[in-house]
Amino acid sequence: MLRFFPALAVAVLSLPILAGLAGTVVPAFGYLPALGGNTFSLAPFADLFSQPGLVRSCIIAFASGVLTAAISVGLVALFVAGWGQTRAFRFVEVSVSPLLAVPHAAAAFGLAFMIAPSGFLARLLSPWATGWTRPPDWLIVNDQLGLSLMAGLIVKEVPFLLLMTLAALPQVPVTASRRLAMTLGYGRVSGFLYTVWPSVYRQIRLAVFAVIAFATSVVDMAIILGPTTPASLPVRLVEWMNDPDLSARFMASAGAVLQLGVTLSALLFWLAIERIAGQMLRLCTLRGRRFRTDALARRAAFTAMALIAVIVFGGLGVLSLWSVSGLWQFPDVLPGSLSLRGWRQTIPRIGNPLWTTVTVGVAATLLSGILAIACLAREQQTGRSAGNQALFFIYLPLLVPQAGFVFGLKLLLLYAEGGATWSALVLVHLVFVLPYVFLSLSAPWRAFDRRYEAISAGLGKTAWTTFLAVRMPMLSRAILTALAVGFAVSVAQYLPTLLIGAGRLVTITTEAVALGAGGNRRVIGIYAFFQMVLPFLGFVLAALVPALLFRNRRAMKVA
Amino acid sequence: MPENSSPGLRLEKVRIGLNSRTLLSVDHHVGPADTLTIMGPSGSGKSTLLAYIGGFLDQDFVGEGRVICGGRDITILPAQERHAGILFQDPLLFPHMSVGGNLVFALPASVTTVRERRTRAEAALEDVGLGGLFDRDPETLSGGQKARVALARVLISEPNFLLLDEPFSKLDMQLRDQIRTLVFEQASRTRLPVILVTHDESDARAARGDVIEVGA
């Protein structure tokens, strides 16, 4: 029976994407009988290109992708090179890693609450340093160049890339290479970049591509932090898609095709950057440039990493404080009074989105867990590791921009009149949850000492008993952590939930972003608080359950 | 007595290969309470031979030949029906179970009542000099104690034969003699055929059986 699971997983990962892409491309050329499009034409594209500011929207999306990736990769490389295997590294790793579980929208709100003209940073400095008694009339959040948007993306993608890098490092003889390079007189940073980084980068390359694909097509962060006149392309797509005039859907589909093009060109541009950077690195290596004095670069990398943790966690703290604040005037650093009014008003309305968030998240996560475990068990049975092909399928949902295929999927669902159902939402979440569950479970699964299973079989236990009584309990911590990661991913989903839920199924995340426009800081604070707390609870459970089950078993504790 | 119903463990033209290269081949009979020692350096395929006999050969390797246990061809059986008692270099006690839990897990299902199972496990611990440790966390035991529990776990499962994969190599000198003596004592008491792979001459001497050198 196990043999069917890998095919099922590939189907779960690729069929919605293929169907969605078809459902995007065909209406883009005017064909969608349900909406009266019976002939193929280029009219949707003509409509699209007559939209004002379209080029600017595309450039913002393109630049967010490329710059976010370049800065995040650069920072992670510099940080790992300069600080790897030090105590400071451990400290930053521990403080930055939890950021991975914070939904993009919550991180964006946190950032906005820190850096806005009336935000916490301005209050800290006012009026004694700045002289402001009213918030300055500056456009920091939603700035024209999209700098806040990129900052928001960077603070979310750096933890992701850092964790991917940490997972890749054990495959490389880091300590030996470092020592060798240092005895040859190379600086800490250059020695690492010359000897270790190329093989690490090769391993995290798909993750970098995923960052680019995500950053070029992100909607929730762009709504909260991005420019408005014009907004970045993916945000405008959503507006067109939700236009009450149904014929705008054709243009929206054409826009989604354009989005695919923007993402693809950002990826191609990145390939060129990879080449140039690789050449430069090789040239420095060949010339034997030592770069022995690298203290400045190291300190800069450390400061940037620490800043990311401080700003986001500070921002989340400020958000939570807002949710219970009474009157909080500028430039007061702390609210003048505390009040539960916001909570009293919001609690009655939050039950429904909360229920949808939790049930959809739990369902998608459990299904992903079963699929991932079955595929890994099958891989072990056949003795074939899944290899690059499988890795491609796992990354597929992360490489195709959501906007590109979820639109098509929505149209297809409309067509099949199976629209906003709970199970459709679970299936769409499954597409995005499964890759993360699989990626976080596969390493510990493959690292399991199979001699335990040999012993168990020798004791006369069936494969099933061995699986349930030996492997599952011994891997319980890893499995539950992977499920917690999956749940966090599900909670954070914005665009798929917005489009497939079609306003009838709303989650904490879609509500938070929708309320963001209203600007009521107390309500935003409450929703963002739930966004943080749900994934956090998942991780707490993942840590507590094995700790309680195996409370007297020292070897079952985290190393 | 016809040859194919003889007691003990018979390896008939067993060959272990990797990518069309033969690593080792054995043709030998190990009688009850006899020990066959396979000596060789690492990479000679001796551990792989044990995997083949126990029924969990890695897909990368090729195994040929028949393994006959008590007159029955077990080559075609899955691992859980061969009842191979295995001891590895590491004790590999299941970390999520108590010491006694490890033994109870190993006890054949024919012992049905919970009380009887516990009594049997406690007696087995007594046999290896660890009476009273039933409820302990395996991780809190010393290296020597862990090795004893691993031995007790194998024996209580009533295996058809023992496969020893350098089980003494990680123990320090003094402990090593102790555990080695205990293992061979218990093996001969239970009249099990034993196959030991090692690269240590003193192991081979202590085993007092036939020795086959491979990969030299």
Image (cartoon, rainbow, N blue to C red):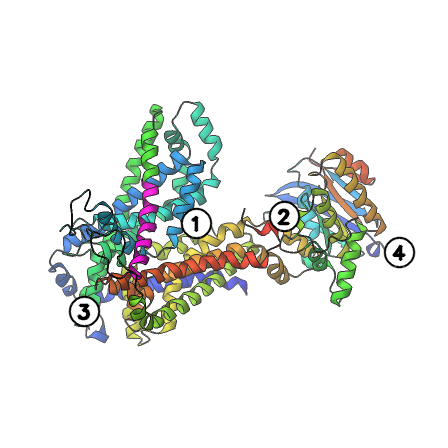
Q: Is residue A427 visible?
A: yes
Q: CA distance from mark 2 to mark 1?
A: 26 Å
Q: CA distance from mark 3 to mark 2?
A: 64 Å
What amino acid is labelled 4 in the image?
Answer: Met
Between residues A331 and A482, which one lies in front from this camera angle? A331
The chain carrying label 4 is B
Between residues B129 and B197, which one lies in front from this camera angle? B129
Residue at point 66%, 38% (across, down)? B44
Q: CA distance from mark 4 to mark 3?
A: 90 Å
**Residue underneath mark 2:** B62
SS for callout 2: strand
What amino acid is labelled 2 in the image?
Answer: Val
Observer-side mark, 2 or 1, equals: 1
**Local crowd size for mark 4, using a 10 Å CA cut-off: few (<14), some (14–19), many (≥20):** few
What amino acid is labelled 1 in the image?
Answer: Asn
Q: CA distance from mark 4 to mark 1?
A: 56 Å
SS for callout 4: loop
The chain carrying label 1 is A
**Residue underneath mark 1:** A388
Observer-side mark, 3 or 1, equals: 3
The chain carrying label 3 is A
